[in-house]
Image (tube, rainbow, N blue to C red):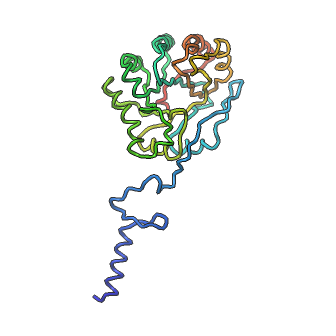
């Protein structure tokens, strides 16, 4: 076989065993395509909604919406049905969760509690009570960072795995695969990485300023805000550190049920 034929054979063999990405050639075997090679944006995006009154769904962040749709992100349920999804964020315990759980039990309403690692570590009894009473305890990251800024895959995965490990220590169960990005901050890349870990990203279609424990809204203002903005398919975000939320929850659940709303679990998604 002459040198020209041998050279052509080697080139052809190399092409068959390789794949082109842009102007680069990588072997098909043993090559892991990085997220940057997939041209995923790392631009930090804030989830927000523009509320509507009269029980109409809000206007979502139009920039964020296609990214949610591509990578298992949800902010609202079926707007044709009077179904609601109640969720609480738990960055720390402020002494109200037991009362919230009492109210949920009274009304037989399921909820999802998004917790960080330290919350599980310092409140194992509350975590067990949530699970035993039929609620979901879900991942809110280990250290509450903007996930868009956690670029390193190992550090990113650790934000999930540390919470999962702590949860399993307490409950001897695997953590449900629902994630709420801290502060509602994310990127196209972070949502893809979250999906690759088997999680659904849960945002919200209702929230209000209830998280400032030094400036709590009045009962009347909070109830009016909630009742005017609730809509079919609402994913409701409340903060369990709120004294006002705790004190009005019984009346809110009573009123919403009397209006024909049904509360369901995030397992619907």
Quadrant (top left/top right/bottom left/bottom right) for the N terminus: bottom left
Among the 4 quarters of the image, the one containing residue 50: top right
Residue 103 position within the rendered picture, expressed as x and y whole percent measured from the top left = 50, 11
Among the 4 quarters of the image, the one containing residue 261: top right
Taking the spot 60% from the left edge, 42% from the top edge, the residue there is 64
* Residue farthest along the front direction in this orientation: 214
- Number of dots carrying numbers: 0
Taking the spot 33% from the left edge, 85% from the top edge, the residue there is 5
Seen from the viewer's position, the closer of residues 155 and 7 is 155
Among the 4 quarters of the image, the one containing residue 239: top right
* Residue farthest along the left direction in this orientation: 1
Residue 256 position within the rendered picture, expressed as x and y whole percent measured from the top left = 61, 16
Taking the spot 36% from the left edge, 33% from the top edge, the residue there is 162
Residue 221 position within the rendered picture, expressed as x and y whole percent measured from the top left = 67, 15
Seen from the viewer's position, the closer of residues 81 and 102 is 102
Taking the spot 44% from the left edge, 21% from the top edge, the residue there is 135
**Left or right: where 129 falls relative to 22:** left
Q: Is residue 5 above or below residue 70?
A: below
* Residue farthest along the right direction in this orientation: 54
Q: Is residue 155 above or below residue 124?
A: below
């Amino acid at each position: 076989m002459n040198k020209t034929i041998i050279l052509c054979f080697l080139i052809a063999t190399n092409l068959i065993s390789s794949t082109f990405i842009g102007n680069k050639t990588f072997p098909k075997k043993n090559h892991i395509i990085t997220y940057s090679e997939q041209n995923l944006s790392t631009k930090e995006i804030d989830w927000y909604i523009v509320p509507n009154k009269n029980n109409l769904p809000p206007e979502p962040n139009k920039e964020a919406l296609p990214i949610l749709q591509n990578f298992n992100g949800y902010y609202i349920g079926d707007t044709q049905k009077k179904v609601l999804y109640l969720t609480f964020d738990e960055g720390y315990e402020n002494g109200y969760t037991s009362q919230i759980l009492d109210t949920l039990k009274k009304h037989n309403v399921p909820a999802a509690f998004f917790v960080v690692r330290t919350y599980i570590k310092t409140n194992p009894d509350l975590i067990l009570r949530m699970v035993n009473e039929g609620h979901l305890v879900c991942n809110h990251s280990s250290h509450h960072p903007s996930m868009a800024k956690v670029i390193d895959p190992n550090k990113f995965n650790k934000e999930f795995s540390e919470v999962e490990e702590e949860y399993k220590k307490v409950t001897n169960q695997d953590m449900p695969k629902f994630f709420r990005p801290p502060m509602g901050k994310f990127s196209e890349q972070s949502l893809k990485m979250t999906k690759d870990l088997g999680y659904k990203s849960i945002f919200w279609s209702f929230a209000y300023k209830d998280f400032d424990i030094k400036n709590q809204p009045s009962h009347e203002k909070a109830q009016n805000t909630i009742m005017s903005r609730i809509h079919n398919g609402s994913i409701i975000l409340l903060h369990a550190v709120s004294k006002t939320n705790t004190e009005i929850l019984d009346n809110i659940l009573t009123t919403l049920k009397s209006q024909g709303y049904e509360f369901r679990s995030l397992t619907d998604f």
